[in-house]
Amino acid sequence: MAASMEVGVSAFSNETDSTGKESSDTKEEDDATEEPEEPKEPRVRETPEDIRFEAIVNTLAFHPTRDILAAGDIDGDIYVYSYSCTEGETQELWSSGHHLKSCRELAFSQDGQKLFSVSKDKSIHIMDVEAGKLVSRITKAHSVPINALLLIDENLLATGDDGGTLKVWDMRKGTAFMDLKHHEDYISGLAIDQAKKILLTSSGDGMLGVFNIKRRRFDLLSEFQSGDLTSVAIMKHGRKVVCGSSEGTIYIFNWNGFGATSDRFAVRAESVDCIVPITENLLCAASMDGVIRAVNLLPNRVLGSVGQHVGEPVEQIGRSRDSRFLASCAHDQLVKFWDISSLADMEVSDYRRRKKKGRSLKALSKKAFGTGDDFFSGLAEDTQGGKEGKEEEEGCDSGDDDSDSGSD
């Protein structure tokens, strides 16, 4: 009898536990049904996320009509990304490894359907942007490695090499109709006027070259400037030509006055390796010290820092189609994006302000400070050998006339 009671109690207990467990499970299911977790909205950043690569990126280019960026590295690989400020949406679209050596320059066609590249392997490649496939190539375009590339129009292409040779190509025929060597060192940059007539070259020999592609001839070389000329751009509505240099000086030429500089401006950087015009008066300049500076021309002012790759030389910078972002690549194997949307609204006074030695650069964006222990390490001027607090002019200021102030 006792045994049967124990069995009955045990059965009742098991039934109770089972029922309680089922009730608890049902309650949890009801709670889950009643209060579903809301999916988190993706974070929207001020700029797209940094893109990390497996090798140092030498060159980059923005698509002319879409949010697409191309990058070429020292291994000869080309990567094409779609970029977005929404976190997690910057994605690789395709990559290509057709170049045998370092990819040195990239450029999209005006319609954005083709991507042109030049390489240390002396070749020119043309890729289909949508398909990511090689369309055509010129394998021995130069006898030495190619260093510079410029698309003149939908049919004409200019290239410059390490030996100082300039070639202008008719891509419909795949042949060069200009093949001229007037520089004694590498061609670092190319620029063309609005009329597509005058082609300018900057070179490691310290001279600016002037070529007439309409008449297919060489015109002249400028006077020698101290250090390599590393880049060239046309500004001030075609009235000024600007060159960066390995000495950290920006040289300014008058249009049709290419023989000698009309002005020069030391930006107090280790070098000015790459310049990109943002407006007719303002440019961004990248340096070996990793800092990207915003510089106003005439009056000449370093306005501040847009961003930096901490302690890493910057290889190239590029401006997006809407002038909202500046992208940069450096030896840290990163492509970074910087917000430059406010630069166009900056006003620069003609008043020449004096500043104390040791004063740091002004940060022009929230990201400009980077993540280094000391952002301004190396940016402050050396105050040794002079009295602390000694004041010096910020830069030469020649106004906006065609004067020869600052010329030797």
Image (cartoon, helix red, strand yellow):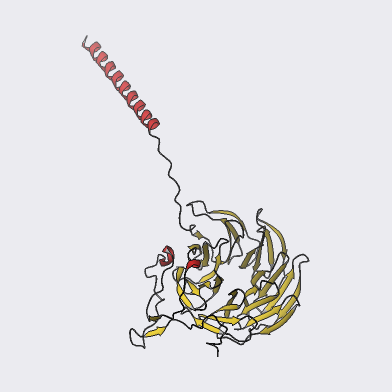
Is 303 in front, or is 205? 303
Q: Can residue 143 be seen in this view?
A: no
Q: Which residue is drawn at 40% across and 30% down?
A: 33
Q: Quadrant of the C terminus?
A: bottom right
Is 312 in front, or is 215? 215
Classify 238 as above or below 174: below
Tag count in the figure? 0
Looking at this view, name the residue that lies furthest to the left: 2
| Image coords of residue 99 (percent x, y) | 65, 64
Snapshot quadrant of residue 39: top left
Is 20 in front, or is 247? 247
Q: Residue at x 46, y 52 (%)?
A: 44
Q: Is residue 301 left or right of residue 238?
A: left
Looking at this view, name the residue that lies furthest to the right: 173
Classify 87 as above or below 288: above
Q: Is residue 15 visible?
A: yes
| Image coords of residue 194 (percent x, y) | 66, 71
Q: Which residue is drawn at 35% across and 85% down?
A: 390
Snapshot quadrant of residue 82: bottom right
| Image coords of residue 273 (percent x, y) | 54, 75
Looking at this view, name the residue that lies furthest to the top: 1
Snapshot quadrant of residue 1: top left
| Image coords of residue 166 (percent x, y) | 69, 76
